[in-house]
Image (cartoon, rainbow, N blue to C red):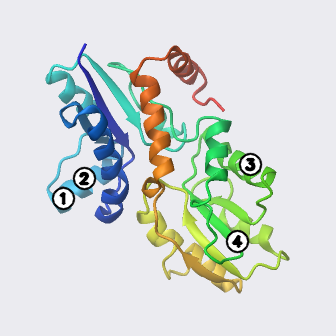
């Protein structure tokens, strides 16, 4: 049976972080499984339109990608998800031609890998880290709090997680940090790419950016524009999840059956 892989992410219109994160992951998949067996797709219609308008590049959505691979004679098509959560975008993915790999943060083991990685949690001489997550309106948003809890269990009470569109906001984190004696804050994206949110909402000089909000509270703020896809251990996590569905382990099939019923696992 001919197998193909559709590397599927939300996407980004920022070429620099696309090359460092999404394109890098795709190349590593191609190196392992063969470039002729791999295609990419972005779930964001807006991002696809921007790229086509500005760069003249047409990127498939998942449905187009599946059809293109099917038309090339592939009988089974694995969708490799590069989503962080089983959120709104992940729930849109279609498994009609093959399984879908789990999102990055699918269970407690995934959370512990994030918490325990030294490079990812490097303070770079600062007193505290504030991670910017995207957030979601569905139940998956609770994963950010679960990850925060894991940091606390590990004794890392100077690492905080807030979201752009989720329940916990930067204002909530400002309140949590009061009276802790922190002076130097490191801002980092908890996103696969360091795109629009990281560049504008997190680290710009706009009056409502996280950087400005924290500076107005008296903190010295440093921003790191490094998407999660740039970290080797994150890419390895995604590759492991792809391998799980590529070799057809039954546990993945059962996980996806539950996902369809519950929309969210954890």
- From mark 3 to mark 1, how far is it between C-alphas? 42 Å
Residue beneath label 4, please?
Answer: 128
Name the disc covering residue 250, or none.
none
Front disc: 3 or 1: 3
- From mark 3 to mark 4, how far is it between C-alphas? 16 Å
Residue beneath label 1, please?
Answer: 53
- From mark 1 to mark 4, how far is it between C-alphas? 40 Å
Tell me, yes or no, whether the two marked residues, 2 and 1, touch with CB atoms within 8 Å: yes
- From mark 2 to mark 1, how far is it between C-alphas? 6 Å
Tell me if I can see residue 236 in this picture: yes
Label 3 CA crowd tier, 10 Å (few <14, some 14–19, many 20+): some
Q: Secondary structure at mark 3?
A: helix
Q: Residue at x 62, y 61 (%)?
A: 121
Residue beneath label 2, please?
Answer: 49
- Quarter placement of the C terminus: top right
Q: Earlier in the sequence, mark 3 or mark 1?
A: 1
From the top left corner, tell me how far across and down residue 236 is, in percent. 46, 43
Front disc: 2 or 4: 4
Q: Secondary structure at mark 4?
A: strand
86 or 156, nearer to the observer: 156
From the top left corner, tell me how far across and down residue 195 is, in percent. 41, 63
Q: Residue at x 80, y 50 (%)?
A: 153
In the rendered image of this protein, does residue 204 appear above or below residue 188?
A: below
From the top left corner, tell me how far across and down residue 237 is, in percent. 50, 41
Tell me, yes or no, whether the two marked residues, 3 and 2, touch with CB atoms within 8 Å: no
Q: Secondary structure at mark 2?
A: helix
Label 2 CA crowd tier, 10 Å (few <14, some 14–19, many 20+): some
Q: Residue at x 50, y 32 (%)?
A: 102
Q: Secondary structure at mark 1?
A: helix
Residue beneath label 3, please?
Answer: 150
């Amino acid at each position: 049976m001919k197998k193909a892989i559709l590397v599927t992410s939300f996407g980004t219109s920022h070429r620099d972080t696309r090359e460092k994160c999404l394109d890098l992951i795709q190349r590593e998949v191609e190196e392992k499984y063969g470039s002729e067996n791999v295609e990419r797709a972005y779930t964001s219609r807006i991002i696809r339109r921007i790229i086509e308008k500005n760069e003249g590049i047409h990127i498939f959505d998942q449905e187009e990608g599946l059809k293109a691979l099917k038309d090339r004679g592939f009988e089974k098509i694995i969708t490799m998800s590069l989503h962080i959560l089983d959120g709104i975008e992940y729930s849109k993915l279609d498994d009609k031609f093959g399984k879908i790999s789990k999102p990055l943060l699918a269970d407690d083991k995934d959370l512990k890998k994030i918490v325990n990685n030294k490079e990812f949690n490097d303070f770079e001489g600062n007193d505290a880290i504030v991670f910017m997550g995207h957030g979601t309106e569905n139940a998956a948003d609770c994963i950010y709090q679960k990850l925060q809890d894991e940091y606390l269990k590990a004794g890392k009470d100077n690492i905080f997680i807030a979201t752009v569109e989720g329940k916990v906001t930067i204002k909530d984190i400002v309140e949590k940090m009061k009276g802790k004696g922190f002076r130097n804050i490191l801002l980092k994206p908890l996103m696969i790419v360091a795109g629009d949110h990281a560049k504008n909402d997190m680290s710009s000089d706009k009056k409502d950016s996280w950087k400005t909000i924290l500076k107005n509270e008296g903190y010295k703020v440093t921003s790191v524009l490094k998407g999660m896809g740039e970290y080797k251990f994150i890419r390895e996590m995604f590759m492991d999840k792809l391998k799980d569905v590529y070799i057809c382990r039954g546990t993945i099939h059962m996980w996806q059956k539950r996902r369809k019923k519950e929309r969210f696992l954890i």
